Image (cartoon, coloured by chain):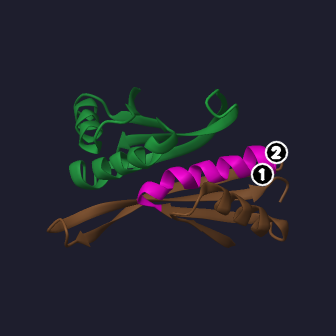
Chain colours: A green, B brown
Amino acid sequence: MKELLVGNKPLINYVLAGVGMLKDDDELVIKARGKAISKAVATAEMLRKQFFPGELEVTDVKIDSETRPAPELGREVLVASIEIYMRKKGN
Amino acid sequence: MKELLVGNKPLINYVLAGVGMLKDDDELVIKARGKAISKAVATAEMLRKQFFPGELEVTDVKIDSETRPAPELGREVLVASIEIYMRKKGN
């Protein structure tokens, strides 16, 4: 399954990358961490509603987190993450 | 089921609100829209891993979106949303 890692670039970059991935694939997982999680959900919804209306569905959404050192804060921080699994209907 | 709506306040506000809600309830749904989605996921994970370690689980995560007018942009925009369902284990 192809993976779309969402980061700091503009939303449209990821939406268009998703469109490209779904041209020759029926499934896709969108992943993001921290503040990019909102953009990952927006990417999934734009693909689902605007680029593949009625064709694409969310099959699963997983959230998790990991503890990471943050030397600049002198402690560890919990960094959240999301995985959004999508699939073309009827596949 | 109690609802925790996550918005623009600091993360800790929502985490502590969640702790309060889970004192006398076994279930909770965390909701957010747009950029607050990342904070909603962080809230859920902090509750799960730091405040209720081993006690609290995510039972479901739903994403959706709605089209809203954006007069300042002269068009409509798609606003994403998330619902994170949580429950104390064994309930």
Spot occupied by residue A84 in the image (x, y as percentages of width and height):
46, 42
Report if residue A85 lies within the magenta region: no
Q: CA distance from mark 1 to mark 2?
A: 7 Å
Q: Which residues are magenta?
A: B33-52
**Label 2 neighbourhood size at 10 Å, few (<14), some (14-19), many (20+)?**
few
Q: Residue at x 69, y 72 (%)?
A: B1
Left or right, residue B57 beside residue B31: right
Left or right, residue A13 beside residue A44: left
Spot occupied by residue A16 in the image (x, y as percentages of width and height):
22, 38
Closer to the camera in the image, A69 or A7 = A69
Spot occupied by residue A80 in the image (x, y as percentages of width and height):
59, 41
Dot label at residue B53 = 2
Q: Which residue is mark 1?
A: B56
State the predominant SS element of the stretch in magenta.
helix
Q: The residue tagged with tag 1: helix, strand or loop?
A: strand
Q: Residue at x 58, y 43 (%)?
A: A63
Spot occupied by residue A32 in the image (x, y as percentages of width and height):
47, 37
Question: Does residue B77 sit above or below A42 in this rendering?
Answer: below
Both labels 1 and 2 in a single chain: yes
Tell me the quadrant of the picture where the N terminus of chain A can be found.
Answer: top left
- Amino acid type for the residue under numbered disc 1: Leu
Check the residue under mark 2 and report the chain it is in.
Answer: B
Q: The residue tagged with tag 2: helix, strand or loop?
A: loop
Left or right, residue A18 beside residue B85: left
